[in-house]
Image (cartoon, rainbow, N blue to C red):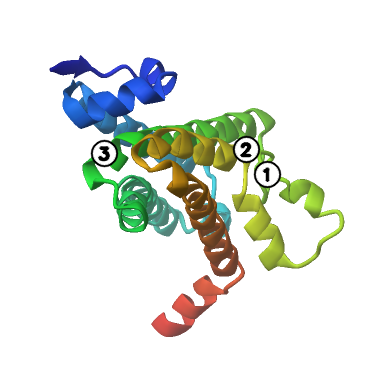
Amino acid sequence: MFYHYKFWHSLKNPAYFTNIVEEGEIAGYKKRVFTVFILFVLLFAAREFWGMGTENLTSLFAMDLQNEYYVARLLSMLGAILWATVYFCFHYYGVTYILHLLTDIPYTWIKKIQLYVVTFLLIEKAILFAVFSAAGYTTLFSFFSLAPLALQIIETDFILFTINQITITTIVIVIVQYLFLSKWEEAASRKILIVKLIGIQLFMALFIGMISVLPIKEWIARGLG
């Protein structure tokens, strides 16, 4: 039995899609995965070309060190492409494996669901980039999260960066994962499943919040010096 993969149709029919994943061959799925990966690379490259995250390199240009500036921009572009690859692989392969360990659902089945996750992350980042491009500047915190509001009453960077990771997209991801993965779980295990899914998101938010406040660049510079 062959099923021609249709992203939005499958998203709206979780029960039907999970049955297809169990019983049939999904035609066109690998093409969709490759397409999403390429879009990730292009988006991260576009953000880099526009100048997101390259503010520190401007000083080289201002000091008339043009050769050094262009080499730094080239290396920064390569770094952005590498980061896009790592980011995609972590959410598509890494999180899939974690969910496999926590649920015992077959790894290949979960991968089909994680494609929705990476797609929603791609959409979120594309919207942020479009808004920042139109505005002509970037902000430290995402308007998809409550961090901009929390900034009015909270001054602790760790808490703010952690809140910044919990966005509208995060909620959508948990809902989508639950709707699909719960079809492969016993009724008694579904409450535990939602706890696991939320727990993964909270752990990632806390980890990124912690990393964000560490002076990693200073440590690297000190180590190289």
Would you say residue 46 is visible in this rendering?
no
Secondary element at tag 2: helix
Q: Gap in Å between the C-alphas at discs 3 and 2?
A: 25 Å
Image quarter where the N terminus lies is: top left
The quadrant holding residue 117 is top left
Judge from the rendering whether residue 135 lies leftward or rightward of residue 83; answer left or right: right
Residue marked by disc 2: 168
Looking at the image, tell me whether mark 3 or mark 2 is earlier in sequence order: 3
Asked if labels 1 and 2 touch by Cβ distance under 8 angstroms, the answer is: yes
Mark 3 in CB contact with mark 2 (< 8 angstroms): no
Q: Establish if 101 lies above or below 4.
A: below
Task: Depth check: give the residue in front, 199 or 35.
Answer: 199
Q: Residue at coordinates 22% horizontally, 31% vertically from top-left?
A: 22
Q: Dot 1 corresponds to which residue?
A: 145
The residue nearer to you, when weighing 111 against 20, is 20
Q: Which residue is mark 3?
A: 109
* Relative depth, front residue between 59 and 193: 193
